[in-house]
Amino acid sequence: MSQTRVLVLVGSLRAASVNRQLAETAVHGAPEGAEVVIYEGLGDVPFYNEDADSGDVAPAVAALRAAAGEADALLLVTPEYNGTIPAVLKNAIDWISRPYGAGAIKSKPVAVVSASPSGNAAKWAHEDTRKAVRIAGGEVLEDVSISIGGTIDKFGDKHPKENAEVAAQVGAVVAGLVAAVGELVNA
């Protein structure tokens, strides 16, 4: 059996963001048979504009769509900005959902991880991300997700992969994605 490729889209562009570190934790803890790749370049993707989505698209868009198209599953890692999904992540979902009904996210297993310094654990962004993915045609895994609150107290200056509980939870999310891909292949 070939490796399952999981593409990770991170909703924070900040290099040292906890959400970026959670994506790195997913890469670090990937189960055997899974290749987990963090997509670099979301900051280069222009805002979705249907006028710009006819014919040749911007190279950054073509690269994002190609990466999503080659992936077997997607892991979206999101902070919460003003009570909702960050624009960069929503924009990525918009681009990979097109053409509508046949975009690169269509029928692929998708899991969402959210994290925030607040006790809310970015749950509003988590739900908004899941909603956007469902509408875009992705198969949101209902029981494969985590929301992490209080990240400053939980991690301090340590990387989330150093927290055994969180590393195990992130690993379980990736394993759930891999299992969902296997179920689709065997269906």
Image (cartoon, rainbow, N blue to C red):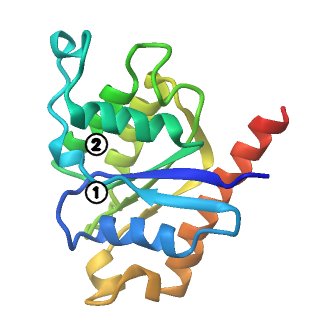
Q: Is residue 10 left or right of residue 111?
A: left
Is the residue under label 1 in contact with that under label 2 (CB below 8 Å)? no
List the residue tagged with mark 2: 89
Q: Is residue 72 left or right of residue 103?
A: right
Q: Amino acid at mark 1?
A: Pro
Q: Is residue 84 visible?
A: no
Q: Is residue 160 visible?
A: yes
Above-or-below relation of 166 to 52: below
Badge 1 element: loop
Residue at 49% in and 34% down: 69
Above-or-below relation of 173 to 150: above
Q: Nearer the viewer, residue 149 or 164?
A: 164
* Residue most extreme to the right: 186
- Point out residue 75 in the picture as x, y percentages from the top left corner: 48, 51
Q: Residues within 10 Å of mark 1 (few under 14, many from 20)?
A: many
Q: Is residue 152 left or right of residue 139?
A: left
Residue at 23% in and 22% down: 57
Q: Amino acid at mark 2?
A: Leu
- Point out residue 111 in the picture as x, y percentages from the top left corner: 53, 48
- Point out residue 23 in the picture as x, y percentages from the top left corner: 41, 65
Above-or-below relation of 25 to 37: below
Q: Give the mark nearer the N terminus: 2 vs 1.
A: 1
Residue at 56% in and 74% down: 29
Badge 2 element: helix
Q: Nearer the viewer, residue 94 or 65?
A: 65
Residue at 58% in and 51% down: 5
- The quadrant holding residue 136 is top left
- Mark 2 or mark 1: which is in front? 2
List the residue tagged with mark 1: 79
- Point out residue 184 in the picture as x, y percentages from the top left corner: 75, 36
Q: Could you give the CA–CA distance between mark 2 and mark 1, rounded to whole angstroms?
A: 10 Å
Q: Which mark is residue 10?
A: none
